Image: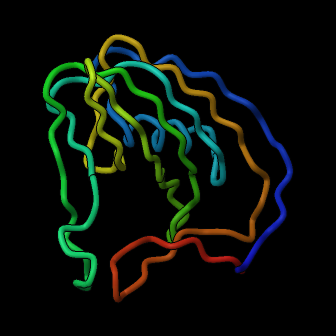
Amino acid sequence: MQFAEAKHGRVFILRLHDGDRLPEALESFAAEQKISTALCFFIGGAEEKSRVVVGPKNGDALPPEPMTTLLRGVHEACGLGTIFADEAGKPKLHMHASFGRNENTVTGCVRMGVGVWHIGEVVVLELLCSEVCRAVDKATGFEFLEIR
């Protein structure tokens, strides 16, 4: 295990609008506000045909091939994620969310694009820490946290 200590920075409350997309909306906001490290909470609705990563197709294959699913119908959504700058200094969101419709639930990563359906509320807690970034791992293609 590696670790870095952070302090609380600014707190932002965002209202996303119908059609706004994750992760793009939060990454753009973070870049505009010069946020390089943050914790993000999302609650709202997800558009039909949003694409969610639900695992690797084969857990032994490197690099892993993502398994994705399309949301069929509008879903309720609740997610938790982090923002850390990549090696070029660009804010990158890593958020997992659960999407529910009727008695069915899908949980996965929003990186392929999740559209907001009417309601999208996000709380962004900025963390002040310059010792952490996302670095690409050549074997997997994942952007792992790197503690300096």
Which residue occupies the extreme bottom position in the image?
Answer: 139
Pick whichever, 11 or 71, lies toward us: 71
Position of the C terminus by quadrant: bottom right
Lateral position of residue 7 relative to residue 132, left or right: right
Colour scheme: rainbow
The residue that appears at 50% across and 69% down in the rendered structure is 88
Lateral position of residue 124 relative to residue 48, left or right: right
Q: Position of residue 43 (x, y in %)?
A: 49, 24
The residue that appears at 51% across and 66% down in the rendered structure is 86
The residue that appears at 47% across and 44% down in the rendered structure is 27
Classify residue 124 by image quadrant: top right
Position of the N terminus by quadrant: bottom right
Q: Position of residue 108 (x, y in %)?
A: 34, 48
Q: Position of residue 95 (x, y in %)?
A: 46, 47
Seen in the picture, residue 33 relative to 53 is either above or below; the reply is above
Classify residue 123 by image quadrant: top right
The residue that appears at 18% across and 33% down in the rendered structure is 71
Which residue occupies the extreme top position in the image?
Answer: 118
Q: How many numbered marks are there?
A: 0
Which residue occupies the extreme front position in the image?
Answer: 103
Lateral position of residue 97 relative to residue 31, left or right: left
Q: Position of residue 37 (x, y in %)?
A: 66, 53
Seen in the picture, residue 81 relative to 139 is either above or below; the reply is above
